Image (cartoon, grey):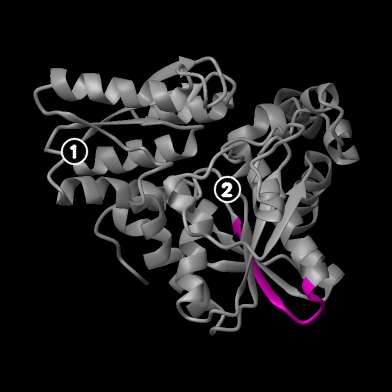
Amino acid sequence: MTRHKDVISLIGNTPLVRLNRVSDMTGCEILGKAEFLNPGQSVKDRAALFIIRDAVKRGLLRPGGTIVEGTAGNTGIGLSMVANAMGFKSVIVIPNTQSQEKKDALRLNGAELIEVPAVPYRNPNNYVKISGRLAEKLAKELPEGAIWANQFDNVANRQAHIETTGPEIFEQTDGKVDGFICAVGSGGTLAGVATGLKERNPDIKIGLADPEGAALFNYYKNGELKSNGGSITEGIGQGRITANLEGLDVDMPFQVPDSEALPYIFDMLQYEGLCLGGSSGINIAGAVRMAKEMGPGKTIVTVLCDYGNRYQSKLFNPAFLKSKDLPVPGWLEQSPSVNIETVMETVEG
């Protein structure tokens, strides 16, 4: 059995898992990279580690220093976890629309959490821009200094997936991978894995699974950044070409509505025991579309980004789903809460 020296060494080398129902339905092998098994429980642990290591290597982050980031949650959780393990502090700026579960996790990790209104990136008070200004201010004020992680335009993010995720997928499939697809938040995962895979086999197809409300589907399809609609998914959806996305070629872009993605999430939990977040639903739906377009017999890999319990108050809340006119599975709507005291009284007679 492998013995790890610290929590940081647990990051990466996640397994692939066959997604049985969608594989059987399409005649393809659709495999999910189980990124929820990282110690911070998301794919963002990889970027967090590489961003911090890069800052240390370049002399930008000194012992006891502070890491500042604007994030929808998971990158912040990864950064605060790695910061704790390496002796740094963390300050996280998050849109107040993100799930309470992610905010709680950040506070548990000891991050100083700053909630701000959710506004578009073009607004100077967008959470990303606020975090950049805050990092600049703290760098001048704190004796140990501070850095801005800047996950969207810090290509150490992409490098994490060039060096780890892409090669892992190629090795785990014995090089027999025909396509890779996932959604974009910062762009690091898609662009990094695409580079890592295509360095080994340039014929591997790269797909984009874009939620409604994001602009990349139209960009890679028609050459114009244009969006429509909206999505309840958190941490994905982009309206610009970040530094991490520069140079990326997408062979198969798809736009996936929530109403198409959520049933995959519910089915995965009910039939395969996988409790996944909303971005994983978008990814699985994209993989299904990719499989149908490529035809049977292909091997397609996507990313299972994080656990669904990080979104329980929204994603698995019938009242919330109904308020957004989204599908609610019968088992979720009819599932009663159990009073353990009543159960014990019945058992004890």
Q: Are marks 1 and 2 in contact (CB under 8 Å)?
A: no
Mark number for residue 87?
Answer: 1
Q: Can residue 83 be spotted in the picture? A: yes
For image coordinates 59% across by 21% down, the residue present is 97
Does the segment drawn in magenta span residue 279?
Answer: no
Label 1 packing within 10 angstroms: few (<14), some (14-19), many (20+): few
Q: Quadrant of residue 84?
A: top left
Q: Is residue 40 left or right of residue 54?
A: right
Magenta segment, which residues? 294-303
Q: Residue at x 46, y 16 (%)?
A: 125
The answer to whether residue 26 is above or below residue 33 is below
Amino acid carrying label 2: it is Val
Mark 1 and mark 2 lie on one chain; the one further toward the N terminus is: 1
Question: Which residue is identified by label 2?
Answer: 184
Find numbered disc 1 in the image and state the secondary structure of the residue it sits on: loop
Q: Position of residue 251 (x, y in %)?
A: 66, 66
Judged from the image, the secondary structure of the residue bearing numbered disc 2 is loop
